[in-house]
Image: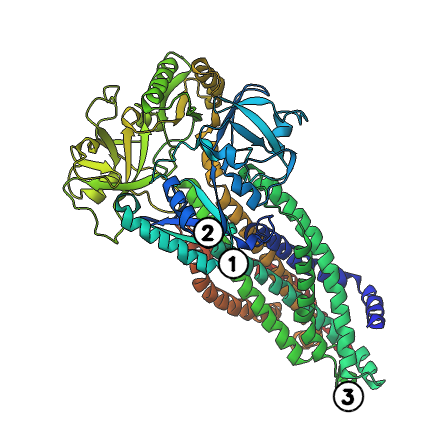
Amino acid sequence: MFSDLRLSLRTLAKSPLFCVVAIVTLGLGIGVNTAMFSIINAIMWRGLPFPEQERLVVVTGRNEAQPRDRFGMSWPEFEEFRRGQRSLVDVAVYMDRTTTLSGPGGDPERIAGTVMSASGTTMLPAPLVLGRWFTADDDKPGAPGTIVLTHWLWTNRFKADPAIVGQQIKVNSEWTTVIGVAAEGFRFPEEAGAFTPVRDLYLKDKRDDRGLTIFGRLKPGVTVQQANAEVAAFGAQFVKDHADTNRGISFGATVLFERFSGDEDRQLFGVMLGAVLLVMLIACANVGNLLLARSAVREKELAVRAALGAGRARVVRLLLAETLLLSLAGAVLGCGIAAGSLEIFRRAVVSAHPPYWMHFDLDGAALLYAVGLAGASCLLAGLYPAWRHSRPDLNSVLKDAGRGSTSAGVGRFSRLMIVGEVALSCLLLVLSGLTIRSVIQTQSLPLGFTAAGVYSGRVALLDREYDDVAKQKQFFARLIERLRERPEFADFTLTDMQPTWDNSSPILIEGRAPEPAGQPPLTSSFKAVAPHFFSTLGIGLRQGRDFTDADSADSTRVAVVSTAFAEKYWPNQSALGRRFRQGAGKPGEEERWVTVVGVVTPIMEGRFNSQPGPQAYLPFTQADDVRRMTVLAKARGGDAAALAPVLRKAVRDLNDDLPIYFAQTLDQMLDEARFSKRIIAWIFGVFGAVALVLAGVGLYGVMSYSVAQRTSEIGVRVALGATPRDVLGLVLRQSGWQLGLGLVLGLGASYFAGQLLAGFLYAVSPHDPGTFVGTVLALGAAGACATLVPALRALRVNPVVALRNE
């Protein structure tokens, strides 16, 4: 085998241009495939950095009203489950919870935090560089405040002070003792900055507040399916015992890692992996064509080897050794391309703050994948050419040697591979076009509000200082008074939710019976807002009025609803004066009914891939919880970012421990919301561009080789009176039928494959005519350019020279 490789290396060295083209082609295919594999592996397959992570399971709740949403358990549900479950060694709880830091170390700041039980830190496990983790005593209500810093926070805020353990800092307005520093890289579950114990969970007594994530490690011999069945049984019992809070709610158990990826993600990445494998097939077809042409030119050499006693297996082995060297060189180049692509991808996604365990790099699995692709490409590209030319007909070779022609079988196979390349390229271009058009649609879709020139900054009140809703409303009322005094604000408002955040909950409509058991309840999204919300955002008031300062906590409860809300729940009627109630509610709670006083145009919420559903707005003065509010403001001078220090000072004047966070313009917020779609469109665009280039190069190579092989035939035709138009038609007809047949096959496959992206697309049909026509035009133009040079070369054939060769 090594002698074959040495001989192959010497043979390939004699054809440097052929080697460069083949290696670059394979390198592109292997490179984009390895990069895509690394991305998908990091997101979907590699998992969490914990031992036996496949035995860590998480409890997942679902609501019939919003089947796509996932949530955890409430504290009472967790306590009942913990006491009664038999499938898990232990049960732990954590909750994502932003944390306010103040006091020593710098200005107040709001960071991502994790509230975690002591059992969770031992179950994972979680390494430390300083101090200790929580104990059961730290979890007890009334225990002294403790905190464990992440290495990132310790380094950035506290300058890696080795004496930090034992010091006190202010956490959510409470002096808290630092008891440890987690090891570098540990920021569970995704990008936490600090960890606190569960002793101060403010929602322990709320059965319907399911913000807790429950996880545990399976007992030996227990499967995920068995744990899922047990958890489902608990969920069914909860519905029986607490129908008022658990109607339509079910629970199940899955592997913990699956919490971070959904069914739609898996389907989308499956489509992307399939698409990039098509790029690899196109590259293999190109190299296969090159090898066919090269083997045809070497027929005399191979015939001599056969005449000297080389068996068919020996010739096949020799030719495959050459292809293997090309494939391995392509793999080396591909790894370089993949590394560069991953670096670009890392820089692009850093603003999206991927989870700490998600590393986009070339690990051992990616390198093995690249080597596997090299082996597969060796067989796919090289096996048929090697087999086809491993038993040459000596008489035929000697007969045709002077004429430089090739067999019809070889030419026919090359043309069929070009048809396949065009079909695959067409499929990739359609998928790329659909995703790109969808992103363009999301960028230009009507939001229902004006984001330009609006500044956004969020304020979170501290539980210990603002422990009842009256104090919360008093703080924000004072903030409104201060902002009204500032000349920098042209208009401003407050809201508990950003405009695009979807916060849906069940509702009851007065005069309409609740939905039957087993049916999803009526729902609407809700926002608690201050006066001028609609004017600040340019949301059109269609009927009725806006909120005013007269809508106080003591006045009649009122609401403004969207036209979608009104049309769905009161079709062909005026919504003004109608009443509804938020939540499942209980009969007789008349004080919970709200009266509709206005109707506004709907705004875009959630995923940017569906039409807005019912939306309702309540005065923040009548809301049950306004612990966190966002200030939305327009600057009088037009520079929204200039409002940041003014707003920060207004808040600090009221409470020096409160920071402004999520501070950005609404345009920046929308860019972040659309970021994932742009990245996916960019990836598909790369696939399409590579496929288009490879298809064009492949068609050019086959047509150039065909013209070279038919030089004598073209010379005879010219000598017998063929015009340049006839010669041009001869060449174009050959490329035309390959291109046409490939497009027909590719468009047919695209018609069905586009359906796989249906859930990702917005305002674009999977069978979008514009995308299909654009694909035909792009491939047609590429095919024309690829054919033009060989066609012009055919026009320059000198019949005298051609006939002399004959």
- Seen at 44% across and 60% down, the residue is 226
Q: Give the mark nearer the N terminus: 2 vs 3.
A: 2
Give the SS element for disc 1: helix
Residue type at numbered disc 1:
Gly
Q: The C terminus appears in which quarter of the rendering?
A: bottom right
Query: Which residue is identified by label 1?
Result: 270
| Disc 3 packing (10 Å; few <14; some 14–19; many ≥20) | few
Give the SS element for disc 3: helix
Residue type at numbered disc 2:
Gly
Q: Position of residue 236 (x, y in %)?
A: 32, 53
- Seen at 61% across and 31% down, the residue is 180
Relative to 715, 106 lies left or right: left
Q: Give the mark nearer the N terminus: 2 vs 1.
A: 2
Q: Position of residue 741 (x, y in %)?
A: 51, 70
Distance between the Cα atoms at labels 2 and 3?
63 Å
Disc number at residue 395? Answer: 3
| Disc 2 packing (10 Å; few <14; some 14–19; many ≥20) | some
Tags 3 and 1 touching, CB below 8 Å = no
Query: Which residue is identified by label 2?
Result: 262
User: Viewer-proximal residue, 167 or 480?
Assistant: 167
**Residue with the most extreme bottom position:** 395
User: Viewer-proximal residue, 164 or 391?
Assistant: 164
Residue type at numbered disc 3:
Asn
- Can you see residue 732? no
Distance between the Cα atoms at labels 2 and 1?
12 Å
Q: Nearer the viewer, mark 2 or mark 3?
A: 2
Distance between the Cα atoms at labels 3 and 1?
51 Å
